[in-house]
Amino acid sequence: MFMLKGKVAIVTGASRGIGKAIAIKLAQNGANVAIIYSSNSEAAKEVVDFIQEKMNVKAVAYQCDVSDFKQTKEVFETIIKEFGQVDILVNNAGITKDKLILTMKEEDFDKCVEVNLKGVFNMIKHSSNYFVKRKEGRIINISSVSALMGTAGQSNYVSSKAGVIGLTKSIARELGSRNITCNAIAPGFIETDMTSVLSESKKEEYLNSIPLKRLGAPEDVANAVLFLASDMASYITGEIIRVDGGIAI
């Protein structure tokens, strides 16, 4: 069963990690996928090649700095021209610049907000008029469980991801009457490049605080995105779904 057959999805930050898993999961379920990446063209090409070889759908990679308002507008318009439509927007692109507040530089705070929050605003801003005209659309934002709990040494990241939650709820109220849903997913500790740099002692500390006693996989987040992108979630909007093994209970 192809839950998303004939649909077109945009996934930002899709060259690796969670974004890559989301792009592949949506493609496996019949969606054509526009992959947005910031710098690693080789990794983005590998994702596109994998999707095109394994699934009978269209996949194209686009380089774009999501924090740049003009670039995001241009890339969205290009995707519409090349794919003919857009049905699903997944805002996954994100960065970390971890430091305690005592040593954090202003530019480290600003950059996290620019990419993690302003980037989500930019993509929603440029897609919203299109979705409103069609009277249909699925917007899925990737936040973080840290935004619900707070994390020492991540005040910039946490602030940006908490902003994504507030933005999600506001957009859900603004666009709901046009049959457009907007939801967020708050992943916990997922095995990605971001968590691979953690020391074994730190990982053990996190594992002890997770009721399921394991780190999540990118596919766990991708499964939640698939659900929210599908017709099964047509009556869900403004929701924040934790995929965190229970850490934020």
Image: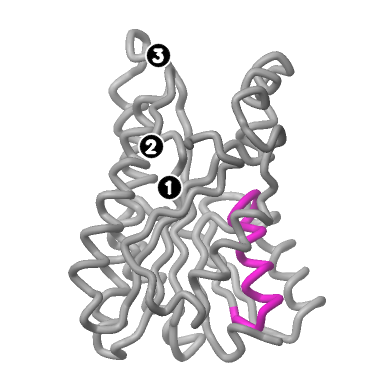
Q: Which residues are magenta?
A: 15-32
Extreme right residue here? Answer: 54
Task: Give the image location of residue 171, x and y in percent.
Answer: 24, 64
Callout 3 crowding tier (Cα within 10 Å): few <14, some 14–19, many ≥20: few
Residue 143 numbered tag: 1
Q: Main secondary structure of the magenta part?
A: helix
Q: Amino acid at mark 1?
A: Ser
Image quarter of residue 223: bottom right
Q: Amino acid at mark 2?
A: Ala
Seen in the image, is 60 located left or right of residue 132?
right
Vertical position of residue 98 compared to residue 160: above or below: above
Residue marked by disc 2: 147
Pick the front one: 72 or 219: 219
Mark 2 to mark 3: distance in Å? 16 Å
Residue marked by disc 3: 100
Residue 141 magenta: no
Mark 1 to mark 2: distance in Å? 7 Å
> Going 71% across and 87% down the picture, which residue do you hit?
1
> Going 23% across and 74% down the picture, which residue do you hit?
175
Which tag, 1 or 3, sits closer to the chain's start?
A: 3
> Going 26% across and 66% down the picture, which residue do you hit?
172
> Going 50% across and 86% down the picture, which residue do you hit?
82
